[in-house]
């Protein structure tokens, strides 16, 4: 198990879910607090605005509450929640694309997404990371989501497949297209830089 | 392994997500092919950028207020349980069991089916009205305004049935179909068959003076009953 999936113990989730279904709000609050961080993390990396990410967190847990009774206890809660977040993010990206004027996503709106904050070892890596972030904005919502789940959220191919409800083969294909598009655009950007020098 | 195939697998090579056979073939190919090896190296280089992004753990500064908002909303919903169950079912149907693309296709299909259904109903209705008029015209000579409700009802039902035939909803012999389409009198005769069927149990009591019905229609009806 990778990423956040290994940190949280599923049995504790199941207890909290059972109590929440009974209407226990303090259990539901505990459930929210327990999973809010990675829900926000995925939303923040997927949508352009910080406010959008916060809205998605809120919408996600409202949906979780509304659908708790349908939760299949054989599966993992984290996968189920990730699925809700991913769908909300894809919907948000699609509607944002529909109404956007061409400029994308992360430009100057989401300060962390554009500039980064910590963990930057050197200028070259920082440039590369920012380039990749910007290029990820130009991917289709599905490819972008697969790329974020696998490469940034560190989920396994199998987990991505469960979250996105697509086959592992389809995950690999989307991942290939996403990474390849980023790679090709990085090469083009490097070539332009060389020409300018 | 050819280069175009290798390109597809290179991005997954370093993660151990490939099957052993493909992995081994790719390893050999990368050792021999300089251009594919260059692509592989660019992926490795990009990995450091991706690792940098991954290391930035976004922190939600408003986590507490968001949690409070969520719990407040949920508490509010608890006061309206009926609404909660209803929206939950809708949500489940629309959001959780399907991917967005599938959902959109499903909605499009439902809308198309609904449009076809409405069109069909409107078409049948307009046809029924027209056929009723044709039937009335055909029977005008022999019928009077005091035609009984039963007969009128029968004619309406016949017209509905015939409109079903015309729209293809009800399948019948092609020759009869043509006759019915062309000749209002045949429509009337066909209607008489239905009348006959409905009133078969009244065989002995049907008399031209008992029910006001055109002669030709009555003859036809009696003939059918005798058969």
Image: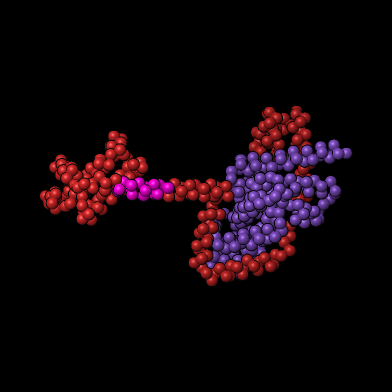
Chain colours: A purple, B red
Q: Residue at x 79, y 40 (%)?
A: A189
Left or right, B88 with reference to B162 = right
The front one of A169 and B137 is: B137
Q: Residue at x 58, y 45 (%)?
A: A166
Q: Residue at x 33, y 45 (%)?
A: B163
Left or right, B177 with reference to B213 = right
* Magenta-colored stretch includes residue B123: yes
Residue B1 image position (x, y, % from top left): 68, 29
The front one of B109 and B28 is: B109
Left or right, A120 with reference to B159 = right
Q: Is residue B70 visible?
A: yes
| Residue A135 placement: quadrant | top right
Which stretch is magenta? Answer: B119-133
- Magenta-drawn stretch, dominant element (helix, strand or loop): helix
Q: Residue at x 52, y 48 (%)?
A: B108
Give the answer, above or below, for where A193 lies relative to A39. above
| Residue B32 placement: quadrant | top right
For the view shown, which residue lies furthest in the front direction? B141
Residue A8 image position (x, y, % from top left): 65, 58
Left or right, B188 with reference to A131 = left
For the view shown, which residue lies furthest in the left direction? B204
* Magenta-colored stretch includes residue A10: no
The front one of B159 and A50 is: B159
């Amino acid at each position: 198990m990778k990423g956040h999936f290994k940190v949280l113990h599923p049995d504790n989730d199941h207890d909290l879910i059972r109590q929440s279904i009974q209407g226990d709000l303090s259990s539901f609050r505990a459930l929210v607090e327990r999973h809010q961080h990675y829900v926000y993390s995925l939303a923040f990396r997927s949508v352009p605005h910080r406010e959008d990410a916060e809205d998605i967190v809120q919408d996600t847990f409202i949906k979780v509450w509304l659908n708790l009774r349908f939760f299949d206890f054989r599966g993992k809660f984290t996968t189920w929640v990730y699925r809700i977040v991913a769908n909300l993010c894809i919907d948000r990206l699609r509607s944002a694309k529909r109404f956007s004027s061409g400029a994308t996503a992360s430009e100057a709106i989401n300060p962390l997404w554009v500039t980064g904050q910590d963990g930057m070892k050197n200028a070259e890596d920082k440039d590369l990371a920012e380039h990749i972030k910007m290029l990820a904005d130009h991917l289709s919502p599905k490819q972008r989501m697969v790329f974020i789940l696998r490469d940034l959220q560190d989920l396994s191919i199998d987990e991505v497949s469960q979250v996105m409800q697509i086959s592992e083969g389809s995950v690999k294909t989307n991942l290939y297209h996403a990474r390849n598009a980023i790679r090709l655009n990085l090469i083009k950007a490097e070539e332009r830089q060389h020409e300018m020098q | 392994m050819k280069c175009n195939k290798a390109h597809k697998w290179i991005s997954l090579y370093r993660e151990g997500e490939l099957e052993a056979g493909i992995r081994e073939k790719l390893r050999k190919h990368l050792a021999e092919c300089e251009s594919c090896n260059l692509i592989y190296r660019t992926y490795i280089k990009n990995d450091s950028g991706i690792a940098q992004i991954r290391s930035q753990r976004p922190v939600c500064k408003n986590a507490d207020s968001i949690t409070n908002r969520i719990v407040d909303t949920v508490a509010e919903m608890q006061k309206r349980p009926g609404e909660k169950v209803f929206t939950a079912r809708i949500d489940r149907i629309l959001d959780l069991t399907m991917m967005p693309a599938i959902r959109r296709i499903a909605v499009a299909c439902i809308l198309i089916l609904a449009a076809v259904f409405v069109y069909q109903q409107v078409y049948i209705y307009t046809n029924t009205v027209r056929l009723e008029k044709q039937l009335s015209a055909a029977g005008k000579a022999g019928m009077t305004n005091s035609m009984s409700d039963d007969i009128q009802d029968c004619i309406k039902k016949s017209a509905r049935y015939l409109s079903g035939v015309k729209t293809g909803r009800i399948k019948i012999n092609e020759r009869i179909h043509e006759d019915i389409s062309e000749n209002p009198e045949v429509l009337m005769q066909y209607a008489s068959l239905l009348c006959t069927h409905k009133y078969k149990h009244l065989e002995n009591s049907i008399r031209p003076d008992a029910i006001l019905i055109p002669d030709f229609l009555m003859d036809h009806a009696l003939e059918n009953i005798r058969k």
